[in-house]
Amino acid sequence: MAENVIELSGLTKQYGGFTAVNGLTLTIAKGEVFGLLGPNGAGKTTTILMMLGLTERTSGSARICGFDPARSALQVKRRVGYMPDDIGFYEDRTGLDNLMYTARLNGLAPAEARRSAEALLEKVGLASSGKSKVATYSRGMRQRLGLADVLIKNPEVIILDEPTLGIDPEGVRELLALISDLSRNEGITVLLSSHQLQQVQQICDRVGLFVRGNLIACGDIAALSRELNQELRVEVELAAQPWSEGLAARLQALEGVLALDTAEWKADNAPAGSLLATLTCERNLTSQIASEVIGSGAELHYIRRKEPGLDEIYHRYFEKREDGA
């Protein structure tokens, strides 16, 4: 069983009558990439600050790498690298100088600090820019330098707060690949706080959906999807040829089918007369639908149950939360 390096229980933060984080209970295993997903103002950054011992909690408990950040903040900071959404560097110094400065603050000797800084610049793709002043860096370059900065002390955990904000698509792809590599190949635990659903889905093992200070759901994409589909409707997509009104009537007559929509099938080399159909059902009717298509004499090119992506999962959970409020 994997070791938990982050353990939060009933973690709460109140500002007067306002509750920013409400009874958060969460565990994150060693080497896991966990996405804390929610809109701006949901309480994600407040949670991170409590985990780092940078703001006091109102109630509850937290253990980070075995230490309570409220009592052993220095021990936590030695083991955790934190990259905020707005990273501060010495603009008139080079990227290499900034990394070496951080390394020296963390107790590395001058020669070791330089070796580590140069190796990390290579890792994050800034080797050719390491001797340029940070003032000349683009937003994406600064974020990669920020990642190198949190890695200079060899942390067990890295916490990234909106790391892809303001970066172009290619820069996002490169940064996400770096983050994924840290977990897969180096065993570093990653907590990624973001409101960018698609990016979180690309690299996270699990996600927690955070709304108004409350963790409303937690799990991998498949588990969240299954949980939703126990309560909500199922969509089945298929392509068949030839399509006829008779086939449509047979499918709509199936018990549990609520709606049928058709569109042109734009797949490569799609046979003439074939259509793409989406059936909204009360439950999973994939096998029954396939039998009806074949029984009608039509050719079934493909059929699948459509699984909601993270964006749809998030919005459905958010709607459920609002309806229950």
Image: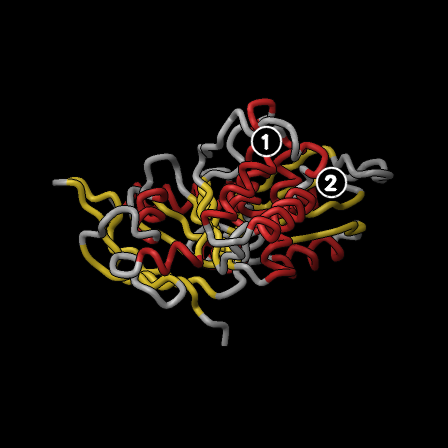
> Residue 33, percent across and down?
53, 56
Q: Secondary structure at mark 1?
A: loop
Q: What residue does disc 2 label? A: 244
Q: Is residue 148 left or right of residue 63?
A: right
Q: Quadrant of residue 65?
A: bottom left
Q: Within 10 angstroms of label 1, few (less than 14), some, or many (20 or more) residues?
A: many
Q: What residue does disc 1 label? A: 94
State the residue in front, 271 or 30: 30
**What amino acid does circle 2 point to?**
Ser
> Residue 199, percent across and down?
56, 42
Q: Is residue 120 left or right of residue 69?
A: right
Q: Secondary structure at mark 2?
A: loop
State the residue in front, 43 or 235: 43
Measured in 3D between alpha carbons, the distance from the residue under mark 2 to the one under mark 1, in whole angstroms, is 68 Å
Give the vertical position of 138 relative to 14 (above or below): above
Q: Are marks 2 and 1 in contact (CB under 8 Å)?
A: no
